[in-house]
Image (spheres, rainbow, N blue to C red):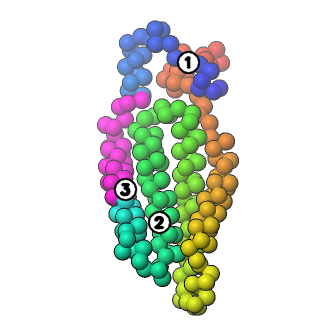
Amino acid sequence: LPFSSFPLSLSNISFNDLADLENMLLWTLHEPSTIALTIMYCLSFILGFIGNLMALRVLTSRRSRRLAGVSATRSLLVNLAACDLAVVCVCMPITLGNQIYTAWVYGDLLCRAVPFTQAVSVSASVLTLTVISVNRYYSVRSPLRARSMFTRRRILVTIGVVWTVSSMMCAPIASLSKRWGTLWTDLSPSQGPNKDK
């Protein structure tokens, strides 16, 4: 049954129930695997966030803009860094929190938005890498032809197509992601809405 069908009533919860609820939701950090996972996620977040910001700063600097020959590749790399930042800033904190908390506590909106954002970002990254590979292939095989094929306008249109295709491919994830179960059924099945079953 949907989570929203059975709202919690704090007035009917005893102190022991609150302690059990707190342990169920908040105190999984004492587990060694959770501690190790938290450390690795924090390091990955810091490195990914700083690294992609530095990449964006270098790729969007005035000196980089002067290099007309790498304009197409620069735009694609900027798009790739943006995809990575979306994963780092949106998906990684929620994924870590979902590992720490034993129940989903972020609401229905993030339940749908986080998997969709992650899937779209990964799909856009893969498609962007594909476009970069094609661009590099023609740049090596036929440099003059590559300049006429990969103009700045065409690259921007290609980036738009990449995000559009990625969003369309991952749209079912947003519509199918749904939060199920209740805190009561997780805490104590005998006290929840299924107690008569």
Residue 46 visible in image? yes
The numbered disc on residue 78 is 2
The mark total stands at 3
Question: How far is disc 2 from disc 3 in space, using C-alphas?
Answer: 14 Å
Quarter containing the C terminus: top right
Identify residue type, mark 2: Val
Question: How far is disc 1 from disc 2 in space, using C-alphas?
Answer: 45 Å
Asked if the magenta segment contains residue 76, the reply would be no
Question: How far is disc 1 from disc 3 in space, using C-alphas?
Answer: 37 Å
Q: Residue at x 64, y 63 (%)?
A: 161
Closer to the camera in the image, 184 or 76: 76
**Do the residues bearing badges 2 and 3 touch, measured as CB atoms within 8 Å?**
no
Q: Residue at x 53, y 52 (%)?
A: 118
Q: Residue at x 51, y 24 (%)?
A: 183
Going from N to C along the chain, the mark reached first, 1 or 3, is 1
Q: Which residue is mark 1?
A: 7
Quarter containing the N terminus: top right
Q: Is residue 191 left or right of residue 93?
A: right
Q: Is residue 46 above or below residue 155?
A: above
Q: Residue at x 42, y 28 (%)?
A: 24
The numbered disc on residue 49 is 3
- Residue 27, by quadrant, is top left
Q: Where's residue 125, x and y in %? A: 54, 63
Q: Where's residue 68, x and y in %? A: 47, 80
**Do the residues bearing badges 1 and 3 touch, measured as CB atoms within 8 Å?**
no
Residue 130 visible in image? no
Identify residue type, mark 1: Pro
Q: Which residues are magenta?
A: 25-50
Asked if the magenta segment contains residue 44, the reply would be yes
Going from N to C along the chain, the mark reached first, 2 or 3, is 3
The numbered disc on residue 89 is none
Q: Where's residue 37, x and y in %? A: 36, 48
